[in-house]
Amino acid sequence: AIFDNSDLLRPSFGQQDFIKPFGRFSLPFIGDIYLNKYDAKKFIIGSTYHDDVNDNRYQDSDSKILLEKIKKYFRNNELKKIGSWTSTRSISPDRRPLFGSIKPNFFVVTGFGSNGFTLSPLLAFLISKKIQGIDLLGLNQFIRINSKRFNKN
């Protein structure tokens, strides 16, 4: 087995909404909510999480939560929902992503929940540089993943 802990990742059901674009916003925004440009006609905002749920029973209430959160940061913009997307995504028990190596030259980037859509291009780039022998940021970000961080003792 690659991981010595079968509870390393678990599913969590959540929602992202699509809203009409506003302003000249073009870069991802990540805080207690994320906003990313999906295409020229819509932005994607997210996300909500519901553990042990696998349906869209929270869709209407989640949309209200997402719009209220995004209004905190973009108060002077008209925000109009134009659609929703619900999905199951992988998360770690502490909701922090798994990013690093398992063994030499074997890298893992997973467990980002809804932030994978926003962060995966950058992380794929960092891993490609590491494979080429370049620690681009000089942060030693490719430390060995230790599943003991999930132990409650």
Image (cartoon, rainbow, N blue to C red):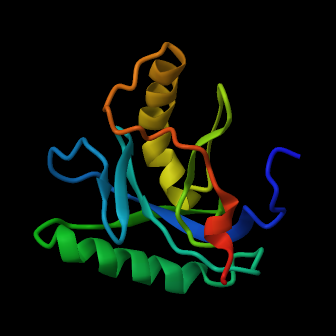
Q: Residue furthest left?
A: 76
Q: Residue at x 41, y 38 (%)?
A: 140
**Which is nearer the eye, 32 or 1?**
1
Is residue 90 at least partly visible in the picture? yes
Q: Residue at x 64, y 56 (%)?
A: 146
**Residue 67 in the figure: left or right of residue 3:** left
**Residue 50 in the figure: left or right of residue 75:** right
* Number of numbered discs on residues: 0
Q: Residue furthest top?
A: 132
* Residue 151 placement (x, y as % from top left): 68, 75
* Residue 40 placement (x, y as % from top left): 34, 38
Residue 107, picture quadrant: top right
Q: Is residue 65 above or below residue 136?
A: below
**Which is nearer the eye, 89 or 132?**
132
**Residue 54 in the figure: left or right of residue 82:** right
Is residue 89 at least partly visible in the picture? no
Q: Residue at x 67, y 66 (%)?
A: 148
**Which is nearer the eye, 121 or 140?**
140
Q: Name the quarter where the C terminus is drawn.
A: bottom right
* Residue 18 placement (x, y as % from top left): 44, 58
Q: Residue at x 62, y 56 (%)?
A: 111
Q: Residue furthest right?
A: 1
Q: Is residue 55 above or below residue 89?
A: below
Residue 71, picture quadrant: bottom left
**Residue 45 in the figure: left or right of residue 85:** left
* Residue 61 placement (x, y as % from top left): 52, 86
